[in-house]
Image (spheres, helix red, strand yellow):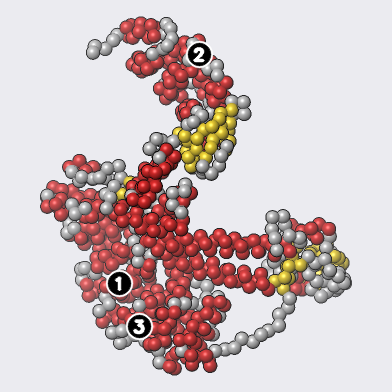
Amino acid sequence: MEKKTFEEQEAQFTEYLQKPPYPVDEMIALIADVPAGKGDEWTALALTAFAEAQDFASAFKLVKARKAELAAKVRGTGIRDALRKTAKDRLLLAFIDSVGFDVRPVNESIGRLDRLLSFQPGALVLSQAWGLGEVKRLDYFYRKVTVDFRTRKGHQLTFEAACETLVPAPENHILVTAKADPDRIKNMLAEQPGEFVKAMLTSFGDMPITRLEELASTHGFVKTANWKSFWERARQDLRKDKLVEIPTRRAEPLHLKAKVEDYSDTWFTAFSQMTEPKSILSAVRELEGESKIKAMLAEEDKAAKIAERLRYALKGARKVDDALYARLAICLDELGLDAETVAKARAYLWGAELGQEDARYLTAVKTLPARETSALVAFLSKDDPDNRKLALFAVLPKMCFPFLSATLDYFKTDAACEEAVANLLKQPQAPATLVTYVLGRYEDFAAWTKLPALIVILTHAIALGEGKQGGETLRMQNVIRRLFADQKWLEKIFSLLQPADQVLFFERFQASIAWDPSTHHLIVVRMTRIVPELASHQVKKVEVKTIERITSMRSYAERKAAYQKLVNVDIPKNAHDIDVARGYGDLRENFEYQSAKDEQRALLQKQTLMQEELNQVKAVDFSEVVADEVRPGTTIMIRTAAGEERAYTILGEWDNDLDRNIISNKTKLAQNLLGKKPGDSFELPDAEGNVSAASIVTISELSVELREWVKVPAGYSL
């Protein structure tokens, strides 16, 4: 069709303005087709016409279509006023005034108004906090929208809050489906768990499995107690579904692809243009997983392009991400591509960079997935294997646990490996990772004759269990403690020890004071059950009379509330995390599982300690205290050597409130004051530990304010 002249366009636009109903779509098209200046002029004319006709719908449609041009030339208040002139409905006017044309960017205000207009009674909306809801009422006077959610009926939000937190619910959203056709969801959960997961990903986007579980529970689809069995069934389905990528790590998201890749020339063209190193590696590994790589490598041009992209990615990862660099180098090597680049990459990973303490491969393994560490050991050892293995054995103490495990597994039958390990274990302080690995798999080393006696390694382990550790050593300490608490492991260890070494092991462990008392006692009892003769070597506890322990009713109630939260919230959540983590593969290499178990040990230890303290400490209100000398429940006025007077109130051992000058009876200052009387002198410690002379001026009972403070706070109980 021949393009109209400007005069013809102007005549056409003028005709459109003559009378409503206005053909707004045609008017927008004409405005977009004329020079910018004329477009602005015609927009103003159209808005004036819409105002006269009180045609808000046409005006807002024009404003949305021209928002970019309007934002550049017109203030938000101008657009607001133009829209107000087209509306006579009070609700519309309230909407227009609520979206912030005077304080927000024009584009944002128009978007918020568009969203508000969709919130009509009966409309379905989504809230991140409350899920699916149905709009029930709109109040123009108070500018509020009332929404019924599944778990919160009649929830009211201001128009402004609604713009922030609500979005129109798409028809294909799983929550909409659940409302309209609940039987379909029930069928999916029972018969097609994989399809249910895909529907969740379509509705909520890619997410980690833990988030998927949380949403499924929150919206009433799958009970927490049933999640493990449901996820096992769903994972079976998803493994067969090429649209879904299941992560190997708990923190990584499930990914739903838009379509199944056909790995055609179009795919390869897109691959050829990739620039992100991680994406390039993922694409190549995907080809391997789909058994497509062999066919592509058979084509010379495609093989060359794959090698070129991997080289490009290798260059991008160099000195940026050592773990990714190692994975890319291994991939190139496994595919048999570009031997020269592979050799340079291997040399790069071996050689220490200027100013860097460790070789690159030692940095790489810190973040390398555990399943890929064995491939790295093989890659590093490929050229000049005799010298390379000796170089690896020399840095065993520096290796992280997964890499040390992979290295020893790879060279387990090598005599030089046995000698290196034996020499390290014979040292006064053996590497924590090596002690943990050897003890955890001791039977695997039955053929090794150069290792020190088992009792020597056990002594290293007991020493590792003691003291405050950090980083990798702390993780090894926790593993050792789990081993010692394992009945079957203990039985096996005692079966391998001579009677004299059994006694030595038992006595050395019994003397260790670093373990929490309940766990230590449990292990000692287990040892005596495994070898009853050890009971004669058990040290009997001597009962010591202790001074009564007291604290205020307030502090006791607060400590009890913290204990109840630990028992009723923190520990059950940890147990749930452990249950979830069991689904992530081999428990020996499952970091999430081990971390959750470590947290469980800490929580249970904390529970034991808090329970003992709550049983031993008595809650008092200090109402019967006589102020004839300094004791818990008295307020003391002191005078320093400089003549300054200060007041302190000594209460129980859990009491501390600096704003009220309340101090615990366990503090150094309180200990120096206890038993003193007016006129007595004492040593006054400062923050740095220095002391100066001071004297007691007066001793008095608690004030009315302090007597109220020591009582049980509202909302707490003893």
Checking the image for residue 407, the label placed there is 1
Q: Do the residues labelled 3 and 2 touch (CB within 8 Å)?
A: no
What residue is rendered at 17% in x and 57% in y?
A: 337
Would you identify the image quadrant in which residue 341 lies? bottom left
Mark 2 / mark 1, whichever is N-terminal: 2
Q: Tell me the mark number nearer the camera, choosing from 3 and 2.
A: 2
- In this orientation, which residue lies closer to the viewer: 30 or 171? 171
Question: Which kind of residue does numbered mark 3 sit on?
Answer: Asn
Dot 2 corresponds to which residue?
54
State how many labels appear. 3
For residue 51, side relative to residue 587 (left or right): right
Above or below, comparing residue 443 to residue 156 in the picture: below
Any part of residue 31 in sight: no
Q: Are marks 2 and 1 in contact (CB under 8 Å)?
A: no
Q: Residue furthest front?
A: 183
Neighbours of disc 2 within 10 Å: few (<14), some (14-19), many (20+): some
Mark 3 / mark 2, whichever is N-terminal: 2
Dot 3 corresponds to which residue?
423
